[in-house]
Amino acid sequence: MAGSGGLAGGAGGSQGTAGGPGTALRASRAPLLFAALVLCAYCLCALPGRCPPAGRVPAPAPARAEPPRASRSPREPGLPVASGSGRRRFPQALIVGVKKGGTRALLEFLRLHPDIRALGSEPHFFDRCYERGLAWYRSLMPRTLDGQITLEKTPSYFVTREAPRRIHSMSPATKLIVVVRNPVTRAISDYAQTLSKTPGLPSFGALAFRRGLGPVDTAWSAVRIGLYAQHLDNWLRYFPLSRFLFVSGERLVSDPAGELGRVQDFLGLKRVVTDKHFYFNATKGFPCLKKAQGSGRPRCLGKSKGRPHPRVPESVVQRLQAFYRPFNRKFYQMTGQDFGWD
């Protein structure tokens, strides 16, 4: 607010004075103050959000009507059985990352499977709302029948230091899905999303490098998220590698059925979602779901998905590629997968 007051004072002074050094000085400061205000607005957008008020958390959707099936697993102790349409359970699997990697697409594709019930919104329990307790968290989950899997997606979990310990405390048997993407492309996509909400940001290069010319600024979240090996190190303190599945964001676009097959195998489910469910939308540049029987139209992700990226100079891209290369190679070694980003 002090910046806006300075701008107002500068305008008033120019109207009441014919000119002079003071007026010129105030005029020269105005662009700098405006840039500072824009940068502050960006920083506020980039900060972790707050836990939403309890009354604003959307109620879980009712379970789909299905014929009763025989129980396939013993009753979990301490979980109350809901009448009629299953019960609310803690998620057996979580999509924990990463932002702008393709997590929303993966979730929507998996929701086609009759044995997966997923929470549509991101509850942010293990990063923002943990103080509300596990009972509150479970109350958000959709009801499931025996044999169905409850799934939740919050991509910021992967970069939240406390999340692995908290999830392990809930259940060390939780299956963890991480969608990863070339960290340079991911960072540009992250910036494009923020730019759409905060026009007037400094350029991508000005934010990616300290003072626009110095070393890569790992304090900027768009850069820091792509240090996958460092984040995975934290998770491996609590979970063995066998509890993870790493999904390629690039292959999720080029071969969605293949990646979905791997996910269904990892979850111990029959491969129900196959290539017959997808078609490639050339306008958006990624796969969409074919229309279901009785549905009026095919289903694609919203307008915010597939937005065009701002033009970033090739020199900036190459500097970031060189910066990420050793981190990428360590990540390949840790996961046993070469994602082909280098």
Image (cartoon, rainbow, N blue to C red):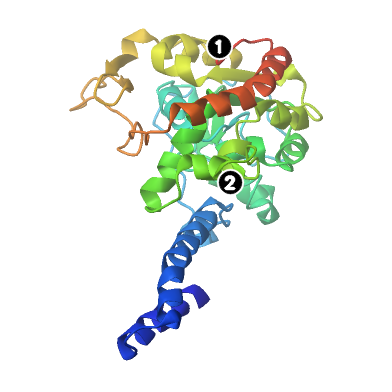
| SS at circle 2 | loop
Q: Which residue is mark 2?
A: 124
- Front one among 118 and 322: 322
Q: Amino acid at mark 1?
A: Gly
Position in image of residue 79 (x %, y %) = 67, 39
Q: Is residue 103 visible?
A: yes
Position in image of residue 156 (x %, y %) = 59, 40
Position in image of residue 269 (x %, y %) = 54, 14
Between disc 1 and disc 2, the foreground one is 1
| Residue lying furthest bottom | 16
Against 83, residue 92 (above or below) is: above
Position of 159 with respect to 271 (left or right) is: right
Q: Is residue 88 visible?
A: no
Position in image of residue 240 (x %, y %) = 77, 21
Q: Do the numbered discs 1 and 2 sit on residues whose CB atoms are within 8 Å?
A: no
- Front one among 226 and 251: 226
Marks 1 and 2, the one that precedes in the sequence: 2
Position of 173 with respect to 275 (left or right) is: right
- Front one among 285 and 89: 285
| SS at circle 1 | loop
Against 112, residue 338 (above or below) is: above
Question: Which of the 4 image quarters holds residue 328?
Answer: top right
Q: CA distance from mark 1 to mark 2?
A: 31 Å
Q: Which residue is mark 1?
A: 340
Q: Disc number at residue 149?
A: none
